Structures are given as C-alpha cells and as structure tokens.
Amino acid sequence: MKVIDKGMRMFPTGFVIINYLLRRGVKSTLHGVLLAILTGLFAASATAHEVRPAIGDVEVTQDAVRLDLRLALEGLVAGIDLAGLDDTDNSPLSGYYDQLRALPPADLETAFNDIWPAIKDGIRIEVDGAEIEPSLGDVQIPEVGDTDIARDSVLTLTAQLPDGDAPVMIGWNATYGPLVLRQVGEGDALYTGYLEGGQMSDPLPREGVAELGALQEFGRYVVLGFEHIVPKGLDHILFVLGLFFFSLHLRPLLWQVTAFTVAHTVTLALATLKIVTISPEIVEPLIAASIVYIAVENVLGGQMNMRRIVVIFAFGLLHGLGFASVLGEIGMNPSRLIADLVAFNIGVELGQLAVILAAFLLVGIWFAKKDWYRAVIAIPASVIIGLIGFWWFVERTIL
C-alpha cells in the first residue's frame, strides 16, 4: 500500500502527461515519450537504497560453527525494520541510515560495537533446540566511497558447539531482512537457503554437508520463482495486467504473453550464466518505463500487430534481467544449474498465469462482454497502472 500511496501523490503530474497523449492521439507521441524516458534515464542519478539480502557463508565442524556475513551494516546499526521493506528510503530512520553511510569505518565500527549486544540476540544458532550464543570476531568495513551506493561490510561470527553430533540450524530476526545462507564445504550440491521472516535453515550436519535432493531443490526454485511474481513482483504483476487489459480475446493475449515469456526466458538464462550483465540501476527504471509504455498504449487503443509484439519482446528482455538479479543474490548450485534455472522459470510462469487467471475471474468473466468494459474498466485500470509505473520511474531515477 505504501507504493500505491506514493503513486497517488504523483497522479496530478501523471494525469497531465496522459491527457496530453490522449489529445495528441498519435503513435509518434508515444514513441517520443519512450525515447525521452530512455534518454533521460542515463542522465539521472539512480537511487541505491534498495534492500538486498545479506549473504551468509557458514562452515560447520564437529565442535564449532563459523559464519561470515556480508551485508549493509548501516541497516542494523540504524535499527531499521527490514522485514518486507524494499527500500530504506521508506523507513522513518532513513535519515540516520544515510548519515551512517558517510561515517568512516572506525566510527561505524564503534557504533556497531555499542549495539552488538542487542544485535546478537537476534542471531540464532540452534543445536537440538538450544540456542548457542555467537561471538563477534573480525569486522571489515570498507572506506567511505559514493554514499549513494551501499557498501558491503563483512562480519565474522563464531560459536562453540556442545558435544555430540546434533546438526546446527541458523537464522536471524525477521527485522534484519532476508538472509541467503550458503554452506561452505566440499561437493557441488551444497546447501543454499533463502531465509526471511525469521525462518531457520535446514539442519546442517557437523560432518559433511547438508545436500538437498534434486527433486527437493527443483521444488524450492519453483516456489522461489512463483514468489518473485506473487506476492513480491508488483512491477511484473502490473506489466502482465497491462497485457491483460489490452485485450481479453485469447489470440492477442496469447501472442503477448508468449512474446514476453520467450524474451524473459532468454535474458534470465544469459544473465544467470553471466553472459550478459547489466546493472540493476539501469534495468529497474527501464522496467518501470515499460509499464508506462504498455499502459499508455492501452489507453490510446493500440493495435495488435507485429510492432506491439516486438515491443513486448524487448520489454520481456528487461524483465528477464530483473528476474536474474534474484538468482544472482541467492546463488545457484553449479551441478544443477540448468535444472534450477528451469525450475525458477516454471515458477515465474506459474506466477504470471496466476495473475492472469485472477484478473479473468475477478473482471473478465463478469464484464468482458459489456459495452462499457473498455471505457469503465480497461482504460481506468491502465491509467492507474501507468501512473504507478511513472512514479516508480521517477523514484528509481531522480528521488
């Protein structure tokens, strides 16, 4: 709801733009707007306060556990509740967070040490249901650079394990944000878990590693792909809804969804395999621009032709890069790379189909054949989608 509330504050400007396009009513205007957006993108400064998951590399031995955490330390020091937060600018503590970014390493370490007793209470290392208290080892904080870009610090935590061979489970407080936990050891099928909401890892054995079965791992990536659309991928949801509100006829919808699917599958694979690498600071604003374009063309009454298919395909390439950023954060099992990639993509497709099915059941099945459907439902919905996309573009490039 926060995103929509912010979008509403931008509505007056958005309505002026869309009203202008409607009065002009020509395709050249639409292409001109897109060109201006793409050109302005590279001249604008990108926001860099997006909440990213912390990365934890864990090594478990018979008598001890070592956890190396790579994270934006300023978030913990500021006390920001990162649970479900997508951007630190949306926190009332964002000002303090920005001040911490400008602190020299020694000063930030001092501030961190002052609140470490409280922070460590939220880091959970469990053996047989009993919590083991972690000890703080090395703290590595980079020098201050561009304060608009998050700096990743590294914390080294250790804990002595009780006698026995009971496995270890690791997690942390939901307010610390998502955590990607990766087990260090020999072999290709090492445990990797994406933990959020206070979730604990699978049991990690003291000898060997916690290897996931191929089918279990495949299922996890399907779920991960689905969750990246529903409920986390609001920008992708709005783009798919933009395709839905263009036409409820099966053939145009099928052409659009197919073009979008093929395109994002290609770039998802290329980016995951590190063949193509483009900064999220470029990709995310362009995704917002794609939502605006599709919404405005819906309002103008665009035709279903090869040009629209090509445009949707191009936008699908962008969205695939956005999907790949998730896999890049989590990491993938080298021995099952293709299978995990296929599983994640299946989850994404299931998420998209769920969005279309929900829209059809809520709107299409009841109102599609009404004479007033386009004027009362499709156009207003597209306007709202376009305005939210416009706000996101402004937020991701200027604010």
Image (cartoon, rainbow, N blue to C red):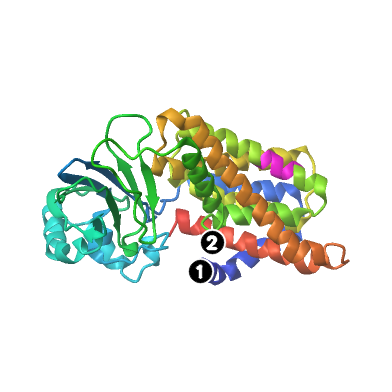
Mark number, residue 391: 2
Residue 125, image x, y percentages = 24, 55
Residue pictured at 63% horizontal, 61% vertical: 385
Label 1 and label 2: CA atoms lie apart by 7 Å
Residue 37, image x, y percentages = 56, 49
Taken as a whole, is the magenta stretch helix, strand or loop?
helix
Kindly state the secondary structure of the residue where label 2 is placed.
Answer: helix
Kindly indicate the quadrant of the structure image that contains residue 64: top left
Mark number, residue 167: none
In this figure, which residue is indicated by the disc labeled 1? 6
Q: Depth check: give the residue in front, 382 or 19.
A: 382
Kindly indicate the quadrant of the structure image that contains residue 377: bottom right
Residue pictured at 72% horizontal, 40% vertical: 309
Q: Depth check: give the residue in front, 51 or 66.
A: 66
Counting the numbered discs, the total is 2
Amino acid type, callout 1: Lys
Crowding around mark 2 (Cα neighbors within 10 Å: few <14, some 14 to 19, many 20+) is many
200 lies left or right of 239: left
Residue 65, image x, y percentages = 19, 46
Residue pictured at 78% horizontal, 61% vertical: 364
